[in-house]
Image (tube, helix red, strand yellow):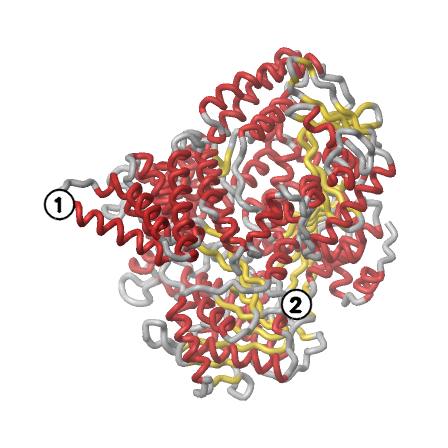
Amino acid sequence: MALTSPAYQEALHQLNPEQRAAVDLIEGPVLVLAGPGTGKTQILATRIGRILETTDADPRNILCLTYTEAGATAMRARLIKFIGPQAHKISIHTFHGFCNRVIQENKAIFDLDELDPVSELESAEFIRKIIDNLDWNHPLRRRKMRYYDVQKLRRFFDELKKEGVDDTEYKLRLEAFEASIAENPENLYKIGEQKGEVKPAVYNKLMDPLNRSYEASKLLPEYQNMLKDNNRFDFQDMLIFVHEAFAMHEDLLLGYQEQFQYLLVDEYQDTNGIQNEILFQLASYWDQPNLFAVGDDDQSIFRFQGANLDNIKNFHTTFLAPHGEAFEKERIIQLQKNYRSSQRILNDADTLIRHNRYRLAQKDFPNPLKASSKVANYDQDITILSYEDSLQEAVGVAEKIQFLHKHEGLAYKDIAVFYKKHATAERIAQYFQHVGIPIQIVRTTNILEEALTQQIRSILIYLQNEMLSPFKGAHLLHQILHFPCFRLSGTAISRVHVSVQKAIAQKLERGEKINEDSNYRLQWRNHSEQLLERAQNPREKEEFKALNSALEKIDHLVSEAFSQPLQHAFNSVIKTCDFLPWINTQYNKLFLLQEVNTLFDFLKSETQRNKSLTLKGFLHTLDLLDSHDIGLRMQKVIHSGEGVQFMTLHGSKGLEFDTVFMIGNDHKTWTTHAHNGFKLPPAPNILDNEVDIEDARRLFYVGITRPKRRLFISYPLLSNSNKNLVECSFISELLMERSKEQISHSKAPEYIDSKIYGDFIHTTIEQGNVLNADASHRDMLQFALDNYVMSVTHLNNFLKCPLRFYYLNLLRIPSPMYPAAQFGSAIHKALEVLFAKYEDASDAVKLEQSYLAFQRHLQRNKEVFSPEQFEDYYGYGKEVLDNYIQQYPIPQVVRRENELTVKANVDGIEIRGNIDRIDKVEATWQVFDYKTGKHNATYRSFNRPHEKVAQVTSPHVATYGGDYWRQAVFYYILLQNAHHPADVQGPTGAVQFQYVEQKDGKIQKSKIVTVTNEDVDTVVEQIKMAHQKIQSFDFQGCGEEDCEWCSLHQSAST
């Protein structure tokens, strides 16, 4: 493939000799040791271009594995600049993304349709059961606080699966480490009769936690069995499934080896054990595979303790050492030129990391990094500052950033603030917002602690109490009426409350017996109506009308709660209590909607797991989340495109900034406390205490190698509890190795603007520990659209009403699953089985299996239906499938694909679609889409734009065409431009919509859409127009009188 892109040619020309060698060694294994700032992303992208330029490889023959989704996105963006649209055909995945693809492409082998991901709560409950079943004298059965280790065991099981370690392998590693204890002189008696023997105290300190961990490793099979028995799997199991399938199904592995002839892996030092085994499986066909790995042991911050050298050693042993020293020398390439930082920063970084004993540079690759960028000779040293406390640290850092921005013109977005723990950033982020410094920050919050979730939870508790016994929830009513969604007057609520209490007191004075609970809500209604009648002015009348309306809504919710499925009851609370209109008026509405969605998604997942889940059971589940300290996590994003970037040191990996502030670097923050959890044994001859320190030092090293010109490292002298603090050991190492002329170390200035400081103190006292989310709406939405992929559903929604798209697809307002939709999904699943499995079976057997698939899907989603609906649909499904097989006999075809996800790129716009079925008849693909419902109800959906048909009354259809016509054209475009899966590209015939239900006892005819070139041009223009408006945040409502989305949007403006 000829590559003429100026960006690619320039990148190739700018490579230094070591980089060029790494790019040009196309065939065979290559290991690149790439320190920070050495351009590893550039050489990965350039190497891919070089493969395409110098070989006959197709883009689809290349697999690039990255550590994060962000890394995959960045790689594809760079490749687009180099090779254009062909970049979309290259497979760039994380290991989990790749394994998910393998599973989805081979459903018959994996057969995971009946499995659901295990939740954190389920996992914790499984482990509690395991602990309950342990003998009373088992090492992991605590006498007190029996479940203290539940979360630690859950994390440990995850680590074992990541590394592919079972109890047998653990025992081998443990024995190897135990044998190495005596090889370290520090562990031995030096004098006396016991000279040369291991000190018992040292032995016990090293071995006791590992022996306990070994006992824990023996529980993993029981945990896995519990997952299996409950039809569950976890995140790491995806990799295990693929690893086992590659081992058991030779043809499966050979298929991927044939497809992916060139393998590239980024951040190789952090690839874990099971990931590395999958990589080696893919490479196992060849004696010298085309495997290109890039890594740096000094930046290994995600693997377990002491594992930073493992992958690189394994790569060397497996692929390089067998071919001789000359081959090794050619195939291991060290990149030494740093194109990011000044030499002064690099020198100090090297000074720090040299304190690590277990690194390649100590022995084989000692050459330090050489600054080769435009700022190589920048003469500012690292500045180390101590502050009185964390608040003064926040103020001092903010003032320094404001000075750099105002007097040196440094953009806020070119500045970053790093920290080890999220809690360190809370106060400084608040202060930045207080003084008007824009920020970008992503943090995880537990929505169960957020006010909105607590309000919804209170209403659900109220409904549950009312369902148990009428008026049992009365004690919550006063609190609920104060919720802002009702927008009620506090004065009106108080007047009714006083009136009710006064009436109760008068009855008591008369000696009457009353049950306050049984009368409370009715009395509220009665007294509110009485006060409305006596109201003297319009304002009072409106206040009491609103209060009466709220009480009526609450009564309505109570009456509905007895008969509604749980999802619909939740949805009724959101709608009836006007949460959405209220949210739509709030400055942080994106967060609030995200919060409601997170809670609703959890409700849906729980009802999926437990079909008979009641409101009482759901509320108990929330209580369990509290008791296990699991919570419901949501990522909260404050995103100002021009803001200072806040992130943890782990999150800073792979990024660069002009100026970096590392905050909160006191000894307490960086001290690794005694490991009271479970862990894997360190490699032999590695001191356990040194492992912890070296892991932490590598993380600190990652931070100090991010800046180009300036680095400020700070720490407080007092903790929040007024205890004295000192600098962390890494600051001490920097100070020890460099004179004070080379590293600035001083206390912050004592002067701080007292007015700003005082205002902030007052604000934080009033608001508590809360980050304001007042970043611009547009910036926050852009964060969601950065990697947007359009589907035909999104396109249809946008063309109907841009606000429909805005609320449904961008903000994702809560919506329950509906019975008719789930019935349709069950029919789809049945037809997938009918056409995909049991190829050699008779039609009768295929039909029987499709019945079972339909029934299983309906059972798995039973929570969506009322008992009557479930019974009706359950019987109706068999009738529908019987009629379908009579109307559409199973044809013989060259090839058939079912439930296929197809991705394509159209004029630079990423699109995707899920196609029910495609049959290859001779050389042409025939596309099928199944529809439940009645034909006539969707007749106009097949019209082309401006097609004059009597039934068309919708201006939307007249202008843009029908949804099903557009769906047919969209699928046609997908198949003509598909880059995944690649082998479905080719000539596409008509698109057939098959109606699977009868109408009035008669079979409905299928509808066939023959796509023309004019159709394609029209829909491509619609895609481009919609995409441009979406990216420009142009969401103008349709203006139709009955449009609920326009009405919802209007409510925010009134």
Answer yes or no: is residue 324 visible. no
Disc 2 residue type?
Gly
Residue 1007: % across, % down: 76, 24
**Residue drawn at x 66%, y 82% as measured from the top left:** 378
Q: Is residue 625 left or right of residue 1031?
A: left
Number of residues whose C-alpha sits closer than 10 Å to that of mark 1, classed few (under 14), some (14–19) or many (20 or more): few
Q: CA distance from mark 2 to mark 1?
A: 85 Å
Answer yes or no: is residue 906 visible. yes
**Residue drawn at x 51%, y 73% as measured from the top left:** 432
Q: Nearer the viewer, mark 2 or mark 1?
A: 1
**Residue drawn at x 29%, y 59% as measured from the top left:** 201
Name the residue tied to disc 1.
510
Quarter of the figure with residue 614 = top left
In the displayed structure, 863 sits above or below 649; it is: above
Name the residue tied to disc 2.
37
Residue 765: % across, % down: 37, 70
First in sequence: mark 2 vs mark 1: 2
SS of the residue under disc 2: loop
Residue 974: % across, % down: 76, 39
In the displayed structure, 102 sits above or below 307; it is: above
Number of marks = 2
Number of residues whose C-alpha sits closer than 10 Å to that of mark 2, classed few (under 14), some (14–19) or many (20 or more): many
